[in-house]
Image (cartoon, coloured by chain):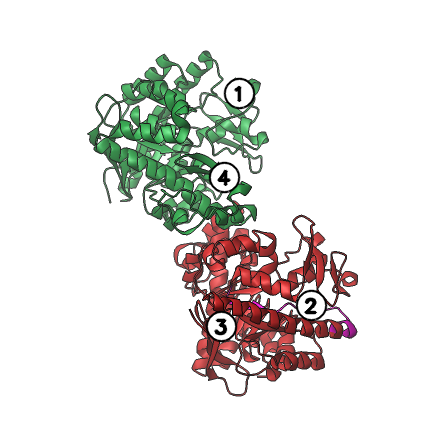
Chain colours: A red, B green
Amino acid sequence: MISKSLEFIIEKRLDGTLARSGLIITPHGSIKTPAFIVGGTKATVKTLNVEQVAQLGGQSVLANTYHLMLRPGVDTIALAGGIHKFMNWDRPIFTDSGGFQIFSLGMAYKKGIDVTSHSIKGDKDQAKNSSSQLVKVTDDGASFKSHLDGNSMFMNPEICMELQHKIGADIHMSFDELTSPLAGKEYIKKAMDRTHVWAERSLNRHRELNNDHVSKEEYLQSLYGIVQGAREEDLRRESAKFLGDRDFDGYGIGGVFEPEEIPETVRWVCETLPENKPRHLLGMGAQPADLFLGVQYGIDTFDCVAPTRQARNGALYTYDGRINIKNSKYQQDFSPIDSQCDCYTCKHYTRAYVNHLLRSDETLGLTLASIHNERFVVSTVDLIRESIENGNFFNYKKQFLERYYGVKGSEKFFEND
Amino acid sequence: MISKSLEFIIEKRLDGTLARSGLIITPHGSIKTPAFIVGGTKATVKTLNVEQVAQLGGQSVLANTYHLMLRPGVDTIALAGGIHKFMNWDRPIFTDSGGFQIFSLGMAYKKGIDVTSHSIKGDKDQAKNSSSQLVKVTDDGASFKSHLDGNSMFMNPEICMELQHKIGADIHMSFDELTSPLAGKEYIKKAMDRTHVWAERSLNRHRELNNDHVSKEEYLQSLYGIVQGAREEDLRRESAKFLGDRDFDGYGIGGVFEPEEIPETVRWVCETLPENKPRHLLGMGAQPADLFLGVQYGIDTFDCVAPTRQARNGALYTYDGRINIKNSKYQQDFSPIDSQCDCYTCKHYTRAYVNHLLRSDETLGLTLASIHNERFVVSTVDLIRESIENGNFFNYKKQFLERYYGVKGSEKFFEND
């Protein structure tokens, strides 16, 4: 049994930036940071088994409280001995609070948008207020309907903590209210204030539950506070200060959607947060620019389901930009997806074979594509870590992004370098 | 380069039966027989990668000429360097001639029946004549329409051999005409005679193509003749005699659909075929009884896509019979699918987890279920082999089938023991 829930060690800082490399130590092992956390929404990494996740360099996965609460139910996971045993993954696991899913349900539910994603594309009218017909938010918590069966449900900070403790991941997130990127400042402020009250309630309940673990000689869990405040500097700084003054084990940053926002939004937050706690950027990592800018402005870990979702649609990363592998021009292309990639797929299979499998609706195609995209993102962050350690970050960033986006397309990502 | 296309060594015979154990040696390695050949219809074993197929004991896979001809096209496979390289499987590969798919298309196309299966469930009127609106058969060959795009296509024995040689498997099948189990004897006889003519034409073209391989120092391929004749003893014996007199490398037996047919149909054929050639029972193996009776009456290899198809639907084998893992009673069942099973799934995962994954439409559920069912069948045949070698076959058969089907339900499978 580890008596400390989480330790964070900063190993190296990059002068003139907020970037650092380090180590997050959990009861299920360490994560070398910066790190990309693999999406494991429903207690499985879509189309992969745990050996494949480990083989592609995945250090940790992030599962989702909202989805697991609905199915299989947290009691089932608790009875299984916790999520690590349930899904056969003995390395660190994060759980998201479920807040994102609950508050985006109204927009996502009828539009076929994957509510596991962090990119909201509801229409403007609907998005102006974060609560929709399907979600009712009060100071106590949120009432919503299950997207599976329409059943009425309720979540508040205390319930959210209880759910996460039953799931039994290593790193939990406090319950927060998501605001749409289109919400007005007044509402953003109101939601942020509520998020702060909820953060304190989350922390209190979390401590009680951790005390129960101590008495049962179970491993301790840790809690990240979630910083909100949309694109408002004063609110972001206020939120980071408020939460930073409370003894969370780390911090999550929610409500960031585009890489262009990072040099401001993430910077405001990371300049304000205590330096000695890990910082997680929620739902970002679909684009390589997210990763480089995120680290540069102080992020230690990322999670994003877009790399594997795109893979399932045939959109695959290469160092020269993204390609659609289902395109007929790859039908007789017997080269790997990317000749510089070291993933299992690129070592053993051709573009022609992946094209064939995806066109034939064979799930092995989904698996091979997902392995490639996930390895691409994981290894990019691993190499960013290396570049911090050897002081080569800006060279690596420039070389990578210029090749990926083109010299012109990448210019905006170097504006403050 | 191996100058012989195929060698078959009989190692042990079981007194009073047609059963034997042996070894089929191909240019890509050996198959210990009796063996279950894993279904690899579209140059992939559905939901599994090749390492998983090898790990579950798969010695060889069977791909399908009809499907590969349509997509990705045999030229693509030839350009890839042959099917072994294309799909990254360096062990023996069989190809089915495609005849089954072509002749069952008419029945299967509009009914959503998987044409990779050998169980035809078309209505009786339509099934009385094997040729349907979508398939026109003449003495030369068969005209049919692609089920993918409706394009008109033509296949005859020569084309079939050319397609298979381009695919480049180790063991090919001659082009045959399938008759429905409901066809009248007159039509069955006519189709059988045509199948014999086609078998000779297949063999001639196959030899020419193998001569080309010799001149290019490529590995040789082998050809099985396909025995037809439905449930008519005289026709089955005539077909086995006719083909047995030709120098095929082995024989396939088509048109067997139920385990109850095996003690007659398979026996008639295997009593008549030359003893020193391997015998493959096409499309059978969905039920454990198929395997025990098949071996008992002279079969060396089986193939069947049903174990993995059933797995994808949640129907999983246990030694006490089949269960539907999606049933709610397994939601909190933390035991393995079968506690006696040695597969990857049973070693690492619970019924509750597989239930959760399949209910959540997660492809890992399909993979874990497929691994289990395929291992169940493969290991059952492997243990049948062992029971031949140590003379324990009848004990093993009785113990296995009585437990699986119940004492009463298994009686019919012991009638001639």
Q: Residue B127 carries which label?
A: 1
Mark 4 and mark 3: span between their CA atoms?
57 Å
How many residues crowd mark 1 within 10 Å: few (<14), some (14–19), many (20+)? many
Q: Pick whichever, B186 or A156, lies toward us.
A: A156
Q: Which mark is residue B411?
A: none
Asked if the residue under mark 3 is in contact with the one under mark 1, i.e. CB atoms within 8 Å, the reply is no
Residue A156 left/right relative to A68? right
Mark 1 and mark 4: span between their CA atoms?
25 Å
Q: Which amino acid does label 3 sit on?
A: Ser
Q: In which quarter of the image is residue A174?
A: bottom right
How many residues crowd mark 2 within 10 Å: few (<14), some (14–19), many (20+)? many
Q: What residue type is labelled 4?
A: Leu
The residue that label 4 is drawn on is B70
Q: Give the range drawn in magenta.
A: A169-188
How many residues crowd mark 3 within 10 Å: few (<14), some (14–19), many (20+)? some
Residue depicted at 52% across the width and 67% down the height = A212
User: Do circles 2 and 1 both sit on a common chain?
Assistant: no
Foreground disc of the pair 1, 4 = 1
Residue farthest bottom in this picture: A16
The chain letter under disc 4 is B
Residue B392 left/right relative to B227? left
The residue that label 2 is drawn on is A177
Asked if the residue under mark 3 is in contact with the one under mark 4, i.e. CB atoms within 8 Å, the reply is no
Q: Which mark is residue A5?
A: 3
Mark 1 and mark 3: span between their CA atoms?
68 Å
